[in-house]
Image: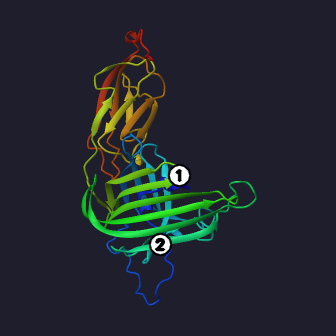
Amino acid sequence: MTSLLRRSLPFLFALSLTACGGGDDSAPAPAGDVGNYAPYAVGNRWLYETSRESLPAAPVGALTEVSATTLPDDRAALELRTQSLETLLTNAQLYLQKRPDALYQLFSPFGGRIISGVDALPLLRFPLRAGDSYTAFRYDNIELGVDWDDDGINERHSHRLDIAVVGTESVTVPAGTFPEALKVVATRTFSETYSQGASFSTVITTTSWYVPEVGVVKVRTETVSDGGPVTVDHQALVSYRIDGVRSESVAPTVQGVTPAPDSTVSAGLGVSARVTFSEELDPVSVNATTLTMQDADGNAIPGSVVYSSRKLTFIPAYLLPDGTYTATLATGPTDVLGTPLATPYTWTFTKTADTSDCLGSSRFC
């Protein structure tokens, strides 16, 4: 469970499973998402850069987008999916419904429920108001439905979420400066208790900043588990497209290519053509015709095209013989907001198997 929560969507860290118990029957009707802090509509998407403080690696792009779907029990839902632009794998997936009182997470009756028998839980209570502080969600001693220690008795767990809507402050992220971002702190505490007496607990404290008509722009998530190290994860908004309006419309450009133009490459183990872009591409816009290679006679070289973290690579299907080759980048690919490459790019290089410079060294040639 801990690893799943750590990999969840940026907004999921920020939102709260707000089971709004009790209340005054005479209270006015919900006002809805005043300011549209949660603009989850079909076609909207956000690009975040994600990082972990304990890791020296550069931030990794993560694309979150909204589509329409229908659950197996015929309930209409919004599907919110986040894809790593490094691995192209889906990191998290959530089913939502936006109602006047809250944004709800839906669960399939055929699996995936957090709480047994509960098919929907409110994630974010509307409207968001600075100064609100409350225990949003609490379940104690709930049966997990699994027997981790194989003693014939299912284990139990408790789950609590405390929310504080702190107020507004200025936040600067790659997407720009937002002078009145609403700061929300969510403290999620959960524990598992084994039937033989052992227990394990985790506290996840997420600080998030929401902006009207944009959504979550920044997230800091601190995870503390019994007997484990403290981990701190960050998400920062890079760009977004909300209701057809883009945060920017600058076309992606070529920052560099490998091998270098007009260079000669000694590559006994083969050579690939790679392009590095100024920004992340939409993986859906990349296909077999995006980056191609031809020999000196104009014959197409068979191969595959791979995209990862602003890098597009053509990998030949076989070791290339010595000769001169031309790589061509088409204008089909777009950035994550849909802006296409402005112009094609072509370069040539020469491949040779000369290994004289490898003698007496540990290089593989």
Horizontal side of 319 relative to 108 (left or right) equals left
Q: Amino acid at mark 2?
A: Ala
Q: Is residue 107 visible?
A: no
Q: How many marks?
A: 2
Helix, strand or loop for disc 1:
helix
Horizontal side of 22 relative to 46 (left or right) equals right
Quarter of the view holding residue 45: bottom left
Q: Residues within 10 Å of mark 2 (few under 14, many from 20)?
A: many
Q: Position of residue 11 (x, y in %)?
A: 41, 61
Front in this rendered view, residue 234 or 310: 234
Say which residue appears at 53% left-offset and 52% top-offset: 3
Front in this rendered view, residue 154 or 125: 154
Quarter of the view holding residue 305: top left
Quadrant occupied by the N terminus: bottom right
Can you identify the residue that label 1 sits on? 3
Horizontal side of 196 relative to 326 (left or right) equals right
Q: Is residue 272 visible?
A: yes
Quarter of the view holding residue 348: top left
Residue 230 higher or lower than 146, as above or below: above
Q: In the image, which disc is placed on residue 280?
A: none
Q: Position of residue 141 (x, y in %)?
A: 62, 68
Residue that sits furthest to the right in the current view: 152
Front in this rendered view, residue 253 or 328: 253
Q: Residues within 10 Å of mark 1 (few under 14, many from 20)?
A: few
Can you identify the residue that label 2 sits on? 136
Front in this rendered view, residue 242 or 28: 28
Say which residue appears at 45% left-offset and 64% top-offset: 187
Q: Position of residue 139 (x, y in %)?
A: 57, 70
Quadrant occupied by the C terminus: top left
